[in-house]
Amino acid sequence: MFFIGIFDEAGVSGTTPRLEIQNIIKAFGGRPVVDNVSLTVMPGQVTCLLGPSGCGKSTTLRIIAGVEMQDSGKIFVDGELVCDTIYRVPPERRSVGLMFQDFALFPHLSVADNVAFGLTGPRAEKRARVEELLGRVDLLRYIDEFPHNLSGGEQQRVALARALAPRPKIMLMDEPFSGLDNRLRDEIRDQTLSVLKEEGAAVLLVTHEPDEAMRMADEIALMRAGRIVQQGAPYNLYNKPVDKAAAAFFSDINVIRGKVQGALTETPFGQFLAPGVPDGTEVDIVIRPQHLKIDLDRNGRGPHPTPADGMPARGLVERARYMGKESLVEFRMDFDGSILKATVPAVFLPKPGTPMWLMFRRDRCFVFPSRTGAA
């Protein structure tokens, strides 16, 4: 499915968002599904709506496309209002391309006719546009084939070419790669991103996979329960999560509970700063497995930590697994019997029961009040 529009850069300022949505609210049966969502996407920018299933990502996309009506809020394209609760530009006039995970190709039409379906104008011009796009997605040799003769990855590229053919100002993509196998997915994502950047459309991509968002997006909007809880560059969301749940969405985490006294939290790994947190508050100290440091040399005799590493704490190996690019080692800690996970970028498979000392850098952990981001 796709929508047709005319691409016209005239009069559009380089600082004007290609897409802007303001305070969008949508409820079903009295339950808010999209709750006061606002964001902007610039020309040529790829923004990802990232979050778990049911958080409102796809509904937001459908509202922007015009196939769902918001309860309140406004949508602008190139600074011009296209929809509020009174005024509404029809979907086919919004210059929006839309891609779904099921590709939605017409089985009775050839590849060429699928791509040309939304085009108008002289036959020769339409054919030239079709050949141009199929060439860019490396499918020109299949121009006269039918969709059922193509692989899943090839069908996805035809769907991309079809959505881009009318030169939409905005491309909306709803989990477009989820039907592909993992090995093929990365290749198709990279090729898709290259074509989208060349076209200069503003792209809003919906996904529940953080790896996909990190790989494709210039900016990520992390959604939870209908709201955008954090928005920014992928680096910032990964390295400066707003709460424990945001940190956990991007990777496995280890959590150590502590209590604040005098802006410090005492733990088996030493003291950690908790500025601005009232005394007596319980906090969660969050550390990613790749930042947990294993003493590989002294093997349980106790390392000599640097100040940045904090104090060492001992644990026994619970189990170790080789994951292909790294090894995942789980430790049962002496201080409370909890399990902490560490990753090592090599083959490292110590036997269960082996004692080892662990440390982690204070500048690689996050400290949140324990209620923040709780499930």
Image: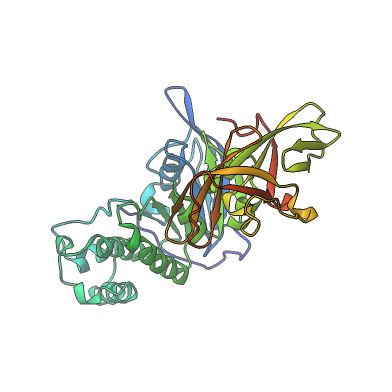
- Counting every numbered tag in the picture gives 0
Q: On the rendered image, what quadrant is the C terminus found in?
A: top right
Q: From the top left corner, tell me how far across and down residue 3 is, in percent.
A: 35, 54
Q: Is residue 50 left or right of residue 313?
A: left
* Residue under the point 68% across and 47% down: 365
Comparing 284 with 101, the one in front is: 284
Q: Which quadrant of the structure image shows residue 303?
A: bottom right
- Of all residues, the one furthest to the front in this rendering is 301
Q: Is residue 191 left or right of residue 113?
A: right
Q: From the top left corner, tell me how far across and down residue 144 is, in percent.
A: 16, 71
Q: Is 136 drawn above or below residue 169 in the view shown? A: below
Q: Is residue 70 left or right of residue 278?
A: left
Whether residue 229 can be seen here: no
- Of all residues, the one furthest to the right in this rendering is 262
* Residue under the point 32% across and 63% down: 184
* Residue under the point 28% across and 63% down: 153
Q: Is 361 drawn above or below residue 32 in the view shown? A: below
Q: Which quadrant of the structure image shows residue 53?
A: top left
